[in-house]
Image: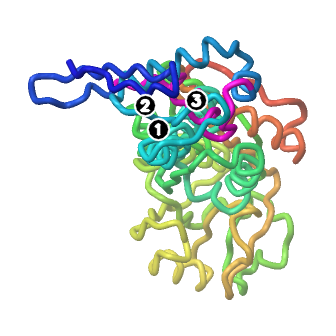
């Protein structure tokens, strides 16, 4: 223990710093003492500092004394007429503001993360929702919660479902995903499915194209293993209207879908096949091709899905999705959340 050095001009200086076996001062500074120090250092007046902190002057003086004892230094030079910072006090003040600011920032960010207003959200999405649905949701989320950082990755449907189930991603967006009871989901919107034809195709001049007129054509589509729900939904509708044509699965599996697959692109351009797409999928349709509505138009839903244990950031994103869906008129009424198995429907 170090004997205190007494400044006879002040009754407040009574440091008793405790050192360990290595001779180091303990340095366990309390934040309330640091805040008290900053107030006195800025006011250079105990009475004004106490008023600023809404505390009695005696309690403030006690906190300063405890801080000085803890550090083993004199922070202020005090006389009956004035209070000044000591050399040690000036050094501490240079650090105190940044320490208190860092603590305040950490507390605020912690609170915001707990409420979903900050943090990170990982979203997986399938290629056909990338052009309109997802950008509208992201724009609104950024407007409401600018401190939420997004990580978004394009995936095929089956991979997206697995990524959310295993916790690698928080939210998935896909059309007709094959879900089970491990995930909750929201049916956000339904879009009419159309067809992509070569611009010289005999049916290219028709709009809409009767489904029956495609009964024996070749359908170029992505493999069922990648998007089983969507594949089954589309084939189910086409076959219920007499489709008996050949299926040509894409070999190049990218977000460009049909026009990124050389074989499918050539077959469609030569009017020997057709593919399926949504009006929102292309801007514009690639040269040499046209998009046409079909009659009757298959209505294909877009689902958002997540784990039941999802955190507040996910819940905030769901609230954004509901509001955007209502604003854009994506559903006849407000979409509803469900917790049940979902298959093609």
Residue 262 screen position, x and y as percent = 46, 81
Residue at screen point 68% across, 75% down:
197
Badge 1, how many Cα within 10 Å: few under 14, some, many 20+? Answer: many
Residue 46 falls inside the magenta stretch:
yes
Question: Farthest residue toward the front?
Answer: 8
- Quarter holding the C terminus? top right
Q: Earlier in the sequence, mark 1 or mark 3?
A: 3
- The residues bearing labels 1 and 2 have C-alpha atoms spaced at a distance of 6 Å
Disc 3 is placed on an element classified as helix
Asked if the residue under mark 2 is in contact with the one under mark 3, i.e. CB atoms within 8 Å, the reply is no
Q: Which residue is mark 3?
A: 35
Q: Which residue is mark 2?
A: 165
- The residues bearing labels 1 and 3 have C-alpha atoms spaced at a distance of 50 Å
- The residues bearing labels 3 and 2 have C-alpha atoms spaced at a distance of 46 Å
Mark yes or no: residue 178 visible.
Answer: yes
Range of the magenta residues?
Answer: 28-47
Residue 270 screen position, x and y as percent = 59, 85
Residue at screen point 82% across, 43% down:
324
Badge 3, how many Cα within 10 Å: few under 14, some, many 20+? Answer: some
Q: Up-down: is 337 above or below 39?
A: above
- Quarter holding the N terminus? top left
Residue 269 screen position, x and y as percent = 60, 84
Q: Which mark is residue 190?
A: none
Residue 255 falls inside the magenta stretch:
no
268 left or right, relative to 333: left
Dominant secondary structure of the magenta stretch? helix
Which mark is nearer the camera, 3 or 2? 3
Q: Up-down: is 317 above or below 55?
A: below
Which mark is nearer the camera, 1 or 3? 3
């Amino acid at each position: 223990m170090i004997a205190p050095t007494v400044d006879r001009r002040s009754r407040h200086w009574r440091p008793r710093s405790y050192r360990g076996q290595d001779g180091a001062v303990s340095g366990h500074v309390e934040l309330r003492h640091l805040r008290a120090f900053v107030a006195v250092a800025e006011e250079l007046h105990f009475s004004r500092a106490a008023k600023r902190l809404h505390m009695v002057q005696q309690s403030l003086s006690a906190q300063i004394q405890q801080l000085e004892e803890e550090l083993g230094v004199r922070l202020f030079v005090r006389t009956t007429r004035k209070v000044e910072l000591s050399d040690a006090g000036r050094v501490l003040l240079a650090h105190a503001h940044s320490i208190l600011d860092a603590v305040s920032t950490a507390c605020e960010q912690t609170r915001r993360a707990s409420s979903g207003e900050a943090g990170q959200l990982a979203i997986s999405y399938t290629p056909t929702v990338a052009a309109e649905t997802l950008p509208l949701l992201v724009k609104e989320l950024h407007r409401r919660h600018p401190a939420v950082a997004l990580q978004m990755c394009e995936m095929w449907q089956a991979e997206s479902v697995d990524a959310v189930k295993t916790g690698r991603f928080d939210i998935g967006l896909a059309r007709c995903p094959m879900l089970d009871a491990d995930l909750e989901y929201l049916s956000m919107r339904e879009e009419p499915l159309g067809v992509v034809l070569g611009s010289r195709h005999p049916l290219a001049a028709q709009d809409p194209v009767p489904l029956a007129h495609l009964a024996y054509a070749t359908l170029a589509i992505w493999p069922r293993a990648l998007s089983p729900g969507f594949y089954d939904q589309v084939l189910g509708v086409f076959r219920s209207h007499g489709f008996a044509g050949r299926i040509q699965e894409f070999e190049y599996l990218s977000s460009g879908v049909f026009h990124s697959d050389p074989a499918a692109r050539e077959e469609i351009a030569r009017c020997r096949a057709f593919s399926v797409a949504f009006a929102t999928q292309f801007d514009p349709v690639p040269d040499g091709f046209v998009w046409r509505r079909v009659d009757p138009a298959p209505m294909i839903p877009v689902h958002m899905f997540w784990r039941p244990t999802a955190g507040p950031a996910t819940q905030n994103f769901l609230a954004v999705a509901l509001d955007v869906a209502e604003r854009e008129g994506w559903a006849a009424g407000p979409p509803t959340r469900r917790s049940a198995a979902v298959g093609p429907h």
